[in-house]
Amino acid sequence: MPELEPRLPGGPSAHIDTFARDNLPPRETWPHMDFNVLPKLAAYPDRINATQALLDSHIDAGHGDRPLIRFAGQIWTYADMQRRVDQIAKALVEDLALVPGNRVLLRGPNNPMMAACWLAVVKTGGICVGTMPLLRARELALIIDKAQVTHALCDVSLIAELTAAGQRSSALHTVANFTALGEDPAADLDRMLATKQPGFAAVDTAADDVALIAFTSGTTGQPKGTVHFHRDVLAMCDTFADQVSVTAPADIFVGTPPLAFTFGLGALLAFPMRFGSSIAFVERPSPDILLETIQRQRCTVLYTAPIMFRAILDRLSDYDISSLKQCVSAGEHLPKATFEAWYEATDMKIIDGLGSTEMIHIFVSSSGDDTRAGATGKAIPGYEACIMDDDGNVLPPGTVGNLAVRGPTGCRYLDNRERQEGYVRNGWNFPGDIYLMDEDGYFWYQARADDMIISAGYNIAGAEIENVLLEHGAVRECAVVSSPDPQRGNIVKAFVVLRDDAEPSPDLIEELQTFVKSEIAPYKYPRAIEFIDALPRTETGKVQRFRLRQQEHQKA
């Protein structure tokens, strides 16, 4: 299979700080990557700066006056965004001493300055490390240590937890805060921008210089960094957004995934910018706020998770969403019932997308007349997918097994060879999903292959919640699994064995839930807790979580 060979540190890389390159997995553990399957991908040059491609190229082509960001009654054009990005880039280099290859943690809701910061870091040759707004200090500190984050740019509303995280880690030495529009002199970064003139030449990064490290929680509960290059950012646009969702300049995007997720980074920044479209940002989306934004901004493309499609169905009659022409679901499996209910109410077929942080974005999907209710779709142009058994043998259509996929993007874990060799086998990526492929090449979701809990579009590691619960004085042992839920797909459920001096009660359930929410992101807390006398175990003492999951599914 034709592949692009990686450049080595000290070669054409623009990075002075080589930490990310030095901590890539060994080349022999990378998946196969083929850029010749699509002419657009095959034409990528050796030198790519993703911000130059997503932003500066539109101004160079004479389209600087196109609207880009719609937020709080304002519109930033592409030229407006370029001016702000260049100011931030100058502040990073001149005031904050950033050098190419430094890791920059970004923390903020979806607003204009969060987007501008991402673009500015990439333009300077820095590496973006996006973090969810709900993460707590202990979670942020783990990410900072793992990626050896040197700088952080943070929305003023979220600075407290980052400050606490900085006290736990010696790696982070430079922090600046900002406001949504970058116009408050009380914020560090906003104040710096007032002294900066526009104009900053994008660093001449190699196509395979690292642009971002995206973190995902696995079954161990420890954060795992996935490394993506500048060319990967373009590849996710030129596959899914170009070949499946078919983006045009007149489109106005809106949605709920945070820019810190690669799902949100693509859906609400890279995809629209690649094709000259615009975005209506919603900082804290609720069903009504989302619908009101669609109505007011006349949005045409909606990206969200199945739970939000279910939540807004009952409110559709109160809003005019006739401007919508495309709806994309990802983050968890789209139930057939949700697809059919949405189609009946709107006459629109939801595009279901399967992707992963390791692969940067969607690789299985379908749209239009190719959509089949209940099926995720086919391998999108640029990717191959098949079903394999545990030994790596390709299985025939109609057989349930492990989904395997490869294409122009693929998994590269930061400093985690053991996990790398589990995710990538014989050149194929194994996202951890159990699927069936039919005779026509459609993939039908069956289950998750690991202990990851997918609830309302969030990936939640049960082990992480167990670690927190075990810190509570009343808990002797615990096991956390998924429990089916009609609204959220699954919820987090904890089975708890109490210490001898603790008594089970509703008050103790609430106390444990509050304790978890105080230590880690609130969306991870166990929505159900059951007290039991003993956990099921093997003869060697390992907890049999599968038995607890089976019990919950039998109840459903």
Image: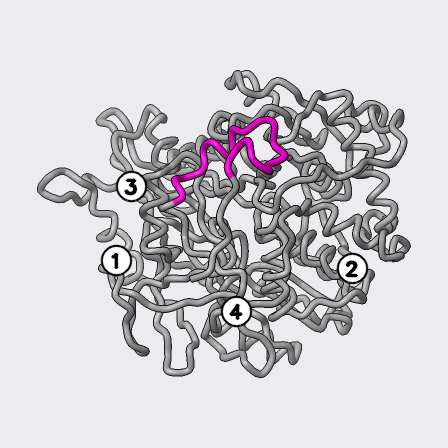
Mark 2: which amino acid? Gly
Residue drawn at the location 14% of the way across and 38% of the way down: 541
Q: Earlier in the sequence, mark 2 or mark 3?
A: 2
Q: Nearer the viewer, mark 3 or mark 4?
A: 4
**Distance (Cα) linking label 2 and label 3:** 48 Å
Label 4 sits on residue: 380
- Residue 529 rendering spot, x and y as whole percentages: 35, 43
Labelled pair 1, 4 in contact (Cβ < 8 Å) = no
Number of numbered discs overlaid on the protein picture: 4
Dot 3: few (<14), some (14–19), or many (≥20) neighbours within 10 Å?
many
Q: Secondary structure at mark 2?
A: loop
Mark 4: which amino acid? Ile
Q: Nearer the viewer, mark 1 or mark 4?
A: 4
Residue drawn at the location 80% of the way across and 51% of the way down: 69
**Residue 501 seen in the figure:** yes
Residue 480 forms part of the magenta stretch: no
Q: Nearer the viewer, residue 402 or 300?
A: 402
**Residue 288 seen in the figure:** no
Dot 4: few (<14), some (14–19), or many (≥20) neighbours within 10 Å?
some
Residue drawn at the location 25% of the way across and 48% of the way down: 545
Q: Quadrant of residue 158?
A: top right
Q: Earlier in the sequence, mark 2 or mark 4?
A: 2
Q: Secondary structure at mark 1?
A: helix
Badge number at residue 479: 3
Label 2 sits on residue: 276
Q: Earlier in the sequence, mark 1 or mark 4?
A: 4
- Residue 379 rendering spot, x and y as whole percentages: 47, 69
**Distance (Cα) linking label 1 and label 3:** 14 Å
